[in-house]
Amino acid sequence: MHGQWSKYKDRGQLVASDRQAKTQPLLKHGYYAGITLIGLMACSLSTSLSAQETSQAESADNTTTAPTNTLTSTPSNTLPTLNSTIPLEITSTKSPVTLESLQHDFDVFSWQSFIALNWPATADGQPNNDMVIGQDPGGPVVWQSWRESRSIFLPGGAQPPAWGQGSAVPEVCQGIDPDSIPPGTLHLTQVGKTPDVLDESEEPFETGPLIDQNGQYTRYEILTNETMFNYVLDNQLYSKAGQQTFDKTNDVAFPSSNTKTQEVGSIMLKAAWIIMGGKYDETKYHTSYALVYNNPAEQPGVKPACSLEKVGLVGFHIAHKTQKEPQWVWSTFEHVANVPTQHEKPQLSAYNFYDASCTDCPVNEPPPRPWNPGNSHSPPSQIERVIPITADTKALNELYHKALSTAVPDSVWVNYELVSTQWPTNAKSTTDPTGVPAPSFLANTTLETYIQGEVKQTSSSCMACHNNATDTAGAFSDFTYLLQRAQ
């Protein structure tokens, strides 16, 4: 029902929109039997369902039999199978389902996705099934061949190159010897999530840059898979003019994964990286080479500069649109050494974004302005996790770590953990366009650093935030802010 929501930022109320006659289909859910009860349980965590909605909730057609090619949840007493196939939907191994059992199933879905996306890749970006995840440390993985947003939304609204064609090296980096730039080198510039520090998503929260324990700015990128990219390209959503034309007769509705056709739907990724060296042991990180450049458009006083650096992955966020979850499934992973948890004794001797010896450092506060990634050293951020990782998710992380280390001893991927998965408990809700998310709040300490917590309208909730996303013409953009980058 995307076309039935208001065009404006506050999308919490239904309106009699003139967009009902547009060509995009209404949202469908088709979820598991008992999901109505699950939605009622989850509403105590986020937003209440009306009595009328409860009485009208559909459950008769919600029972689903898992297709034979859909990955299944793993019993807690066996190691999961490591697979290069991206899952298209979750499957439930418990009947009747509960909120807790479905959360576990979605967390398994997240780990399956993480494994598949970080599988060693061939030269054309496909999974290399002659190898297993972890066998090629520092080598290319599947998602690193996807399209970074700055190669999609080009100056002047120009049409981006087709999938598989490389993007141009930033002008400021052209002084670097091309022969010294390895294949697959990243282009990293984003240093914060606030409108006046270059922001790929323009999400409506006051945030700021994150500075690691070496005094260097964390860098970010946002990427899409081929399905999502082709939807933007085919509908000319890469330009403001194209969006205005499209919006006259259509609603933005990115393709969903389809278990019948086995087509992978739209997937969007956010990745956070830190420069290796100094206090960091690069053998503990998934690494890549990157052109790290500073853009004067980000902040007054920033001078253009570019350097070739080895960087390590510290944050990884997956958004996957499926048929049953039209609000997308939101999975977030972090490096295990990012931060300690508030009110818990630090478990590690050193962290990426926390110094136990600094007793007077302000915690979870953006650095003071001015922000300049060109500084040789900036005061490090002091970050703690606000919402603890649940016991069930910790147990699942341990299970996957065992599977990873069994496949490849000393696998670098045992240094990454799932924080949680946010999913809609009632995707067809007529009063809550976010689908009554569970859990209510979700934050990655590298991506939503300064908006962690459990305060409605303030703290990080992937689905609540992205429900407000629009394109440059103000039309609902299907839970992504990327279209706002069009020129």
Image: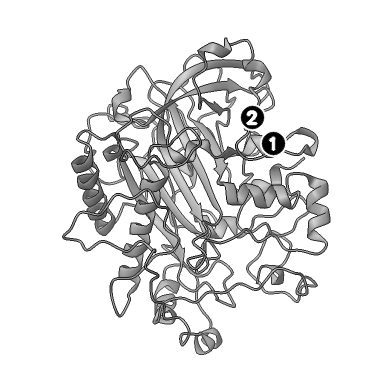
Amino acid type at mark 1: Pro
Helix, strand or loop at label 2? It is loop
- Above or below for 177 versus 87: above
* In this rendering, position of residue 413 left or right of residue 196: left
Number of residues whose C-alpha sits closer than 10 Å to that of mark 1, classed few (under 14), some (14–19) or many (20 or more): few
**Percent position (x, y) of residue 162?**
67, 39
Report if the CB atoms under discs 2 and 1 are less than 8 Å apart.
yes
**Percent position (x, y) of residue 271?**
48, 38
Amino acid type at mark 2: Ser
Q: Residue at x 57, y 55 (%)?
A: 465
* In this rendering, position of residue 398 left or right of residue 321: left
Q: Quadrant of residue 307?
A: top right
Q: Residue at x 21, y 38 (%)?
A: 347
Find residue 167 and name its label. 2
On-image quarter of the C terminus: top right
Extreme residue toward the bottom, this view:
55
Q: Quadrant of residue 25?
A: bottom right
Q: Nearer the viewer, residue 333 or 234?
A: 234
Q: Nearer the viewer, residue 379 or 16?
A: 16
For label 1, the residue is 161
Spatial CA distance of label 2 from label 1 is: 8 Å
Which of the marked residues, 2 or 1, is nearer the chain's N terminus? 1
Task: Give the image's coloring scheme.
Answer: one colour
